[in-house]
Image (cartoon, rainbow, N blue to C red):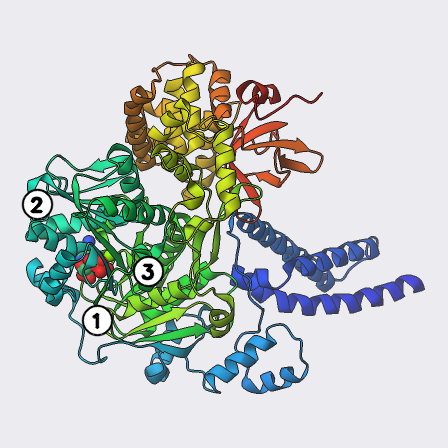
Amino acid sequence: LERSDKKAYEEAQKRLKMAEEDRKAMVPELRKKSRREYLAKREREKLEDLEAELADEEVLFGDVELSRHERRELKYKRRVRDLAREYRAAGEQEKLEATNRYHMPKETRGQPARAVDIVEEESGAPGEEQRRWEEAQLGAASLKFGARDAAAQEAKYQLVLEEDETIEFVRAAQLQGDEEPSGPPLSAQAQQKESIQAVRRSLPVFPFREELLTAIANHQVLIIEGETGSGKTTQIPQYLFEEGYTKKGMKIACTQPRRVAAMSVAARVAREMGVKLGNEVGYSIRFEDCTSERTVLRYMTDGMLLREFLSEPDLASYSVVMVDEAHERTLHTDILFGLIKDVARFRPELKVLVASATLDTARFSAFFDDAPVFRIPGRRFPVDIFYTKAPEADYLEACVVSVLQIHVTQPPGDILVFLTGQEEIEAACEMLQDRCRRLGSKIRELLVLPIYANLPSDMQARIFQPTPPGARKVVVATNIAETSLTIEGIIYVLDPGFCKQKSYNPRTGMESLTVTPCSKASANQRAGRAGRVAAGKCFRLYTAWAYQHELEETTVPEIQRTSLGNVVLLLKSLGIHDLMHFDFLDPPPYETLLLALEQLYALGALNHLGELTTSGRKMAELPVDPMLSKMILASEKYSCSEEILTVAAMLSVNNSIFYRPKDKVVHADNARVNFFLPGGDHLVLLNVYTQWAESGYSSQWCYENFVQFRSMRRARDVREQLEGLLERVEVGLTSCQGDYVRVRKAITSGYFYHTARLTRSGYRTVKQQQTVFIHPNSSLFEQQPRWLLYHELVLTTKEFMRQVLEIESSWLLEVAPHYYKAKE
Ligand code: ADP
Ligand code: MG
């Protein structure tokens, strides 16, 4: 070797050595396959370094003969690099899909207390304030999981779970209970054996039956406050029925903020009364009416009762209206308050009940002219609250790990996990089942049961079935299980601290659904679910510091963070013109109201005086968003109502049309692409539905094409309902005969507000100039047309437009000349 080469060679050797050390540090990490660990470690920088180094070496050693050992070195490093690339690609894909995460100060896990002292001196380290606060709160003690019997349990679970697969929790607080934590809980089986009537008598509300009925008789408006599970929803309407409030054809309405709750509670009450669901007891939710002439107890969503005002402005056929889950403060519940208060004034015989978990009752009372509050004493066992020692980077992964941890280390009792939505719940259930399968007989049986709004009702019913002996049940739920549903046997609650929340920017008119931290009130409701049958434990996947400093006290009422187009249209058609002075419990922001008026004006629903137009009246008849109603009305002009109805129906079951089983991703993606039609996603939806209809609505067809049968079935229901309403809004049934431009124009007539345009720096919304992106699932993702409209914006990692359609700018002038002007 030449001298200079020799020197270079030595240099390279040194670097190789360093690279080797890097590799040593890196490889075990890569092997662990743990995304949480890996992504957290700035893999990008490392990979780039490694790449640069390899490139250097390749130049250096271009024509130097390497020893076998060195060659192997180099080969190994290349493998590490390729592996790292693969992981990064996988990570990025997932990041794209991942929801917007909640960032909390970073902190190293499991740092010993001594180290903390030292760090404290060098102030300013991230997470240091948090650490200090937590130290103060917790004292030096940091109990590992379950405290007392921890040591014994520890040894056992170490055998099953690897150490890096566990999460350390600290106990920090206790939710007080009214009951002593003694005595074994009544097992689910034992409860099942008791007759249904005995169960009814055992509910906390039962001893107060007479008192409650007297209070209702004596007062027109009564606020009822009681812990979740005390029997408000299922019992009170029955008491009223037994007391004769449904004589002479009168009905009792009980509203629920959620569809699932309305369905499930009605089913339960029908069973308790021994009647068929849909006869004396029924439910009514949007696009699904399970009631008949005979139905006197009507469970319904708050939105449905709101629509009842359209046909019966004084609710004349109702003797009692119970606004349940009032503390949820949904938009519809809030509007109901104002309307019902008004009706109650001129219908003195109407009874109004406002039922709520133990929150906010004073406010409701004040709103209803100081109506009396009836408190049903709670029955709750204490709940120990545990926090993680450090923030978790990936709460889904952390959830799965914690469930297994609880399963392996904790005494019997079912687990309730709170996640934010269907996708997340399905992912978590899949991960859990997968791991249980791998652990096999090393662990006891774990029944994994999901519950969310779109779950078919037979699946929903499974969460209420008693857990078989020896097994443990884990229910993975949305907020639905926070207060609306009570599942017996829950002892452990796992709370990642997030919920899906709508937010609205009245300046831009953008509505988005994001995963946000839940409120303290929510967190405490969730924890309370653990203390129903015995003393329980709640594991929060965030730190005590985060609870104290980063969670809001209560959730902002929906009316203050949503668009009001729908509600304003409804109120206008009820003859309520002066919206600024409507009796709101909490008024919406002034700008939001104005924008709603402006949008309705643009859609032609209101005239320049703010009065309802004929077209506006028709739009209010359809139980869908104003933009969607406008689209349906416009299909008359473009003679394509058949197609538009299908598009409308498919849009309302949005996002759950295709499925993608893990083992057949490629097949599923191919199947999806086969449905693509030029023009965009709305036409793809139309195409799927049409082909399905041609197959005779076959489930086999769905299976072969990776389409979700139950979503399609629901779309068919919705379509039928909408078709039934067409006559009311004077739209005839016509087909475009394959002329899709007409369909696209009709869609544009409704959605000209939601348009985006390709600029040099990507897509921008036309009106607000906001940067937006086509969702990677869209059929137009790779085409990037110049003009498009979108059905909705979803904020995950970016503002994504979901369901996009290519349009021509000239159409905007055609469908909304008052809104768009041609550039001179
Ligand atoms: P609240 O409205 O006060 O929260 P509910 O009336 O919903 O209480 O529930 C009372 C009790 O009825 C619950 O504790 C539970 O035991 C039982 N229950 C309610 N729904 C069901 C169901 N679908 N299946 C079995 N039991 C149920
Ligand atoms: Mg209830």
Q: Which residue is mark 1?
A: 379
Q: Which numbered tag is attached to residue 607?
A: none
Q: Say which residue appears at 45% left-offset and 74% top-offset.
A: 168
Q: Position of residue 161 (x, y in %)?
A: 40, 70
Give the residue type at disc 1.
Answer: Arg
Outermost residue toward the top in this view:
737
Give the residue type at disc 3.
Answer: Ala
Q: Nearer the viewer, residue 810 or 38?
A: 810
Q: Position of residue 400 (x, y in %)?
A: 40, 62
Q: Position of residue 429 (x, y in %)?
A: 36, 54
Q: Nearer the viewer, residue 575 or 736?
A: 575
Give the residue type at disc 2.
Answer: Val
Q: Image quadrant of residue 572?
A: top left
* Quarter holding ligand 1: bottom left
Check the image and report above or below for 795 versus 523: above
Q: Quadrant of the C terminus?
A: top right
* Disc nearer the start of the sequence (3/2): 2
Q: Which residue is mark 2?
A: 275
Report how far apart the C-alphas of labels 2 and 1 lie in the structure: 29 Å
Q: Say which residue appears at 30% left-offset and 19% top-offset.
A: 727
Classify residue 20 as left or right of residue 324.
right
Classify residue 203 as left or right of residue 61.
left
Q: Which residue is mark 3?
A: 366
SS label for mark 2: loop
SS label for mark 3: helix
* Disc nearer the start of the sequence (2/1): 2
